[in-house]
Amino acid sequence: MDDAFQAASQPALQPAPLTVADATDRFDDLLPSQSIHFAVPPLRTLTWRVNASATLRIQSAQVWVTRARSPYDHWLQPGETLRLERGERIWLSTEAALPARVSITSAWQPPFAGMRRCRERLAAWLALLTLRRSREA
């Protein structure tokens, strides 16, 4: 009887808590992405304004990349990548005899994401304007 009483009075075993590694493993699935593939013609310069943070990947031929507001130019070989930030402007050119194939990959954005961002900027601007006027009064 004492054994049965002791077994009943002991707390039930709790499962081990999840570790940080267990929690992040569940979220390591790749999110949807969108890629734009294009060719950079020889001896011509293309310009691109990045709408969302993206990765520039060179597929074939060496490409010269110039970034606005950066004192450095980049010569990228096939297989190399360069991280681009939203709003950044880049210029691409190649001195190869054939067009250079390039891709820009970014996270997929749902439809009307730009409208949502525009609404958020407008709300922030109105809040700032209201705050300035209240300080002036």
Image (spheres, rainbow, N blue to C red):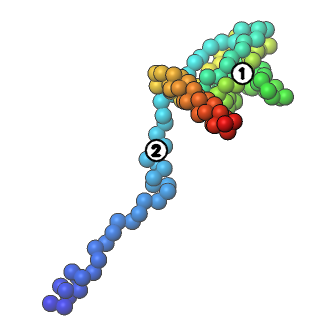
Q: Is residue 89 left or right of residue 36?
A: right
10 Å crowding of disc 1: few (<14), some (14-19), many (20+): some
Callout 2: helix, strand or loop?
A: loop
Amino acid at the residue labelled 1: Arg
User: Residue under circle 2?
Assistant: 27
10 Å crowding of disc 2: few (<14), some (14-19), many (20+): few
The answer to whether residue 55 is seen in the rendering is no
x, y percent for residue 105: 58, 25
Point 46% across, 21% down: residue: 111
x, y percent for residue 123: 55, 30
Q: Residue furthest front?
A: 137
**The N terminus is located in which quarter?**
bottom left
Callout 1: helix, strand or loop?
A: strand
User: Residue under circle 1?
Assistant: 89
Q: Residue furthest right?
A: 71
Q: Is residue 134 left or right of residue 30?
A: right
Q: Is residue 105 left or right of residue 27?
A: right
Q: Nearer the viewer, residue 34 or 38?
A: 34
